[in-house]
Every structure is written in structure tokens, then in C-alpha cells.
Image (cartoon, grey):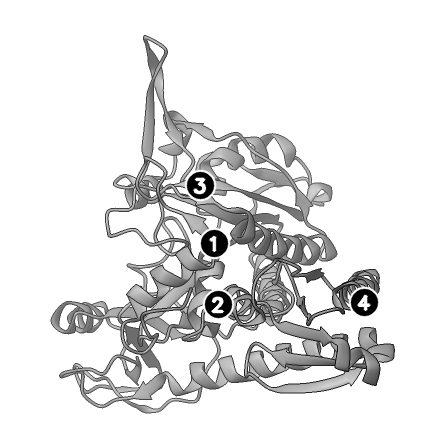
Amino acid sequence: MVIIIQKEENFNEWYNEIVEKAELSDKRYPIKGMNVWTPYGWKIMRHIDTYIRQELDRTGHDEVCFPLLIPETEFKKEKDHIKGFDAEVYWVTHAGLNELDVRLVVRPTSETAMYPMFSLWVRSHTDLPLKIYQIVNTFRYETKQTRSFIRVREIHFFESHTCHDSEEDAQRQVEEDFVILERVMKKLCLPYSLLRRTDWDKFPGAYYTVGIDTAMPNGRTLQIGSIHHYRTNFSEPYNISFEDANGERRFVHQTTYGMSERLVGAVIGVHGDDKGLVLPPALAPIQAIIIPIISKGNADTVNNATQDLSRRLNDAGIRCQVDDRDERPGSKYFHWEIRGVPLRLELGMRDIENGLVTYARRNDGQKGTFAIADAEKEAESILDGIADAMLQAAWEKQRTAVQDVESLQDPPEKILRFGWCQEEECGHEIEDRFDLTLLGTPYNDDGYEGKCIVCGKATKKAGYAARSM
């Protein structure tokens, strides 16, 4: 089985082929956009969930699990929020044959589910900060063409929600979220940009939103997450207040941070090649695959040696498996290359006699040998080197995906950087006239100086725009 479509030739078709042939997801479930997680894809997602949990637990967040359904009465309390989601939500209107007195929303995100409970949990300044998270499925009616992991209607989703006694403490939480993001993205070997969204594109009800975007090989961007500062925009309608040290009641300031299964889509798109998937070692269900090289009369010796090597590597914490199927080695190479296994180890009679293991790195094809006696140390070192190389290569691609432009006529398929005065009128012209998505301005000042690409006014802010996935 080989990949028929080349990545550079047709990224969208290549992507669909990789998902199918690497057996990451099955889209044949009879509801469009609600796909089945197959075992290999689900193991990748579970590794991502594990790293997210580790970081949230490390920073003092507690995991919860809220109900799926939200009463319409609660959902409507924040007017901007419901306006932002009214075209995307699923409604439950009946229980059996009985029409419900209050319609129920199937969770598109969880602000309006959690915040009535927060108003019960938070009473005093001693209850703050409140930091919780959950990893659940959310549901949004996606009207565009669906694509596995990138545009789906049932979304595997991580969300953290925090409450603070001041705007300043909430801002400190946003800064902590950036550290959490950096540590998780290092595991995934994914680059990203932090762009403060426009007022018309921020999360419904937010004071401001920071989008987390990564560049895809077709020149488009994929938003893989977002971080929001709410001020008191939710706490006031939901009456989430506390008694401060002076006995006065005040509304809490809130933040949220969310990422989804789009992370899997980003890993596929950023790292994959014309042979298939390329997985960062931290995500790979199988980090090292051992291929026995058997010739007549030595099967038992080689098989015993490969099983012993597998046990040693697994005991050392390396996820390892032996492919002892009755197939030719070349067929096995293709099988595991498509699935993106980072490290292939080959062991034949000549290797055993010389005390060596032959290896091949999936990310760059580099080959070599190391001593069987040092297998644990050598395999770990190679996997670390693969991760470092993948991260470095991905960041270089992200940097070269951004292009400074002085005109938006016939824009290239890149992330475009240009002067923007931040006036809404100019922003809408950029989007409407040139069919681009204005991603916003850098969260951290990038030292830009120039003129607005629309009106010519001097500005020290760069705007970023692209076509999105």
C-alpha cells in the first residue's frame, strides 16, 4: 500500500488519503462530521490528552466533568455568547413524546453550563482563584465541508475555566496558559503564532481572544486553540461574585483556554510526507518497530533476539513492538512508514553475530547501526534527536510561511504580514475585498512600523491575514 497523491500536488486529497491509510479515523458513521476514532488515532489523541492533563495538574487546575445538556434559559444569559453560537448549536426539544418546557442545548462549549455552578461554588476571596478543566466532546453544526480532525461536528475538546479576584490576576493566568501551551506544543513538535483576534472575530462574550494558529503546507492557517480573557462579561449575568477582604461583594474576572482534536490534524499536515504520517516520538503509539530479517534456518534465533530486544526497550519506557507477520520486510516497511512510527529497527542473523542493530529514522530516512548491548540508551537518544529535528524543521516552515506584503492584489498562498491601522472599516475591506481572514495582530509586539495597507495611515501594528482551513 503506497500513498498515491503527493503532498505538494494536492494537500487536501493527500490529507484525506493519509487519514484513511494510516487508519486514524473512520468517517463512514451515518452522521456526517461525526467520525469514529479508530484504535491508532485514538491512542495518538490519548497521548495528547495525557500531556494536557499533566500540564494542567502541574499548574493547580482540577479536572471536572459537566453534563452535556444546557438549559436554554442559562444559555441565553450572555447575549453576545448566544448570538455567536445560534447558527451552530443542536437543540433537544423532546423527551420521548413529550415536548420540553425548556429547550436544551447540546454543549457547543461550556461557559453557560459551568457558570451557574460557579455562582454557587464561589462565595469568598478564599475560594479564589478557581481553576478547573475538562476533556469532553462538544457539538457544533459545521456548515462547511467536513474533514477529519479539522472540521467535524462532534469535537474532542479540552477547556480550562478560571475565576480570579482581579483583572490583573486573570491576566497572569493568560500568561501561564502561554507557558502550558509551549510545553504541550514541544511534545507535538508543532510551531504556532499568537495573534490577538479582531473584535468581530473574538470569542462571543470575550474581552479579548488570542488565537493559536499554525501554518499548513498549502499556505493556509489552522487555528488549533484559543485563550480568552473575559473580564466580568460572564460573571455579571451569571452572578459569580465574592466577598473580598473588606467585606464588599465583587464580580470575578474569568479566563478560558481551549484546544481540540485539530491538534491531530496539525500533526498530520505539518509533519507528514509523501510516504505517509510522521509522528513525533511523544505521540507515537509505537515509538520503535522491530523488523526481524529472517533467512532459511535462523528463524528461531532471530525471533528470540527480536523479542528480547522488544522486552528490554519496553522495560526502559520505549513503546516498542515486533512485526513478526509472515510478510516480506519491504511490505512491513511501507506499513509502518504510512503510520509514522518514528524509529525502525532491523535485526537479522548477521546483526546478531556482530552485536548490532540496524536502524532507520522515519523523519529524515537517516540510517545507521548501534550496539545491541546499548539498545536502551541508543534508542532513547535517537528518539530525542528525532523530536529535536522535527521541532526545528517545523518552526523553520512556520517562519518561511509568513510573507511581508505591501499590496493584497493577487495575494500568495502564505500568511501575509502588512500594516494595519486596526480600524474596523479597513479590516473588513481586507477580508471582503481580498477574500482573506484577518487573523489579528501579534499578541507580543514584533517591532513593526509602516503604513496601513488600506488607508495609508502610519501604524506600529502589523496585521496578519491568510486563507484558513
Label 1, label 2: how far apart the Cα atoms are: 10 Å
**Which amino acid does the dot numbered 2 rest on?**
Leu
Residue 208 in view here = no
Label 1, label 4: how far apart the Cα atoms are: 35 Å
Q: Badges 1 and 2: C-beta atoms under 8 Å apart?
A: yes
Asked which secondary structure carries label 3, the reply is strand
Q: Which residue is mark 3?
A: 138
Label 2, label 3: how far apart the Cα atoms are: 27 Å
Q: Which residue is mark 2?
A: 277
Residue drawn where x is 85% and y is 79% of the image: 374
**Which amino acid does the dot numbered 1 rest on?**
Leu
Q: Position of residue 76 (x, y in %)?
A: 35, 33
Query: Which residue appears farthest toward the front when viewing the image?
Result: 297
Label 1, label 3: how far apart the Cα atoms are: 20 Å
Q: Position of residue 346 (x, y in %)?
A: 68, 75
Q: Earlier in the sequence, mark 2 or mark 3?
A: 3
Label 4, label 3: how far apart the Cα atoms are: 52 Å
Q: Which residue is mark 1?
A: 24
Q: Earlier in the sequence, mark 1 or mark 2?
A: 1
Q: Residues within 10 Å of mark 2 (few under 14, many from 20)?
A: many
Q: Name the side, left or right, on which 113 lies relative to 409.
A: right
**Which amino acid does the dot numbered 3 rest on?**
Thr
Q: Earlier in the sequence, mark 2 or mark 4?
A: 2
- Residue 301: give its label: 4
